[in-house]
Image: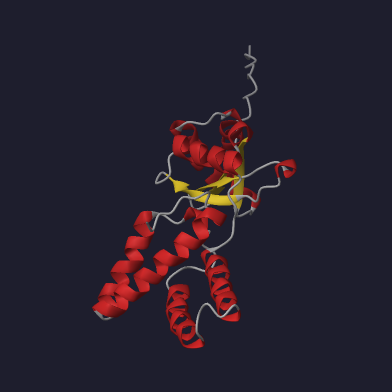
């Protein structure tokens, strides 16, 4: 007499992609360092599967957008509702920029309404002011030419997309060290004096009075 073997159907195993989606969706704001690491792992799988370059998480209460790339890079942005009239901007990369500091920076921008003009735009504003002095005859053409030559060097020292209000003290020190290493002492001092004048002129307009060059 033969025995009938009853087989229990096997439950279909979830794919790595499905596990990654579950892991991604399980992370809810406010985010922690553990959330970020979990999302990095999940994003690599999801983005490779979907063929997309990045995927974002939002922490709307703190004006944050956190971008995950398929290479594992995490970039944090400040992003604001349209009604606030504020332009979003890059705050930094994780883990160099930790989430509590990113939240503080985003809230500071939201509170103070810092403008998003670049260093290049700030330098142009300063140069336009000098041209106005020439027109008012409070500065000579020769002096303006001297300032313009220095201003040209300042433009070369900064990424044209760098936001003026985001420039740090350490970034200015790096610029100064480069000048010291590549130019004469007098020239480096002249350029640094010009840089300080630019920041003194633009900080009240573009950085809520925060003058990192002081």
Measured from the top left, where is residue 147 in percent x and y?
A: 45, 79
Q: How far across and down, in percent of the image, does residue 19 sit? A: 57, 33
Up the image or down, 139 lies above or below 167; here it is below
Above or below for 2 versus 146: above
Q: Which quadrant holds residue 182?
A: bottom left
Q: Quadrant of the N terminus?
A: top right
Q: How many marks?
A: 0
Q: Residue at x 63, y 29 (%)?
A: 12
Please say if 165 is above or below 177.
above
Query: In this rendering, is residue 150 above or below 68?
Result: below
Residue at position x 49%, y 82% in the image: 144
- Residue 208 in view here: yes
**Residue depicted at 56% across the width and 75% down the height:** 133
Residue sitting at 64 percent across and 16 percent down?
A: 6
Tell me how the rendering is colored.
Answer: secondary structure
Which residue is nearer to you in this view: 187 or 44?
187
Where is residue 206 shown, x and y percent of the image? 55, 55
- Is residue 17 something that shows in the picture? no
Looking at the image, which is closer to me, 157 or 13? 157
Quarter containing the C terminus: bottom left
Q: Nearer the viewer, residue 3 or 46?
A: 46
Identify the residue at the far bottom of this view: 142
Q: Position of residue 92 (x, y in %)?
A: 48, 50
Q: Residue furthest front?
A: 137
25 left or right of 34? right
Give the residue furthest to the top. 1
């Amino acid at each position: 007499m033969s025995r009938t073997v009853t087989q229990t159907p096997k439950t279909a195993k979830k794919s790595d992609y499905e596990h990654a989606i579950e892991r991604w969706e399980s992370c809810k704001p406010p985010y922690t360092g553990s959330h970020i690491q979990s999302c990095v792992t999940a994003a690599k799988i999801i983005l490779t599967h979907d063929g997309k370059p990045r995927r974002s998480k939002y922490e709307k209460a703190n004006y944050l957008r956190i971008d995950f790339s398929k290479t594992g890079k995490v970039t944090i942005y400040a992003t604001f509702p349209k009604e606030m009239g504020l332009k979003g901007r890059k705050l930094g990369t994780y883990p160099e920029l930790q989430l509590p500091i990113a939240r503080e920076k985003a809230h500071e921008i939201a509170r103070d309404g810092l403008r998003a003009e670049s260093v290049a735009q700030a330098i142009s504003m300063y140069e336009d002011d000098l041209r106005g002095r020439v027109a008012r005859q409070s500065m000579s053409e020769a002096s303006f030419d001297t300032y313009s030559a220095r201003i040209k060097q300042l433009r070369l020292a900064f990424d044209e997309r760098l936001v003026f209000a985001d420039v740090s003290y350490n970034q200015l020190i790096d610029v100064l060290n480069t000048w010291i290493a590549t130019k004469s002492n007098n020239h480096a001092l002249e350029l640094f004096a010009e840089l300080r004048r630019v920041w003194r002129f633009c900080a009240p307009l573009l950085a809520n009075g925060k003058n990192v060059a002081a």
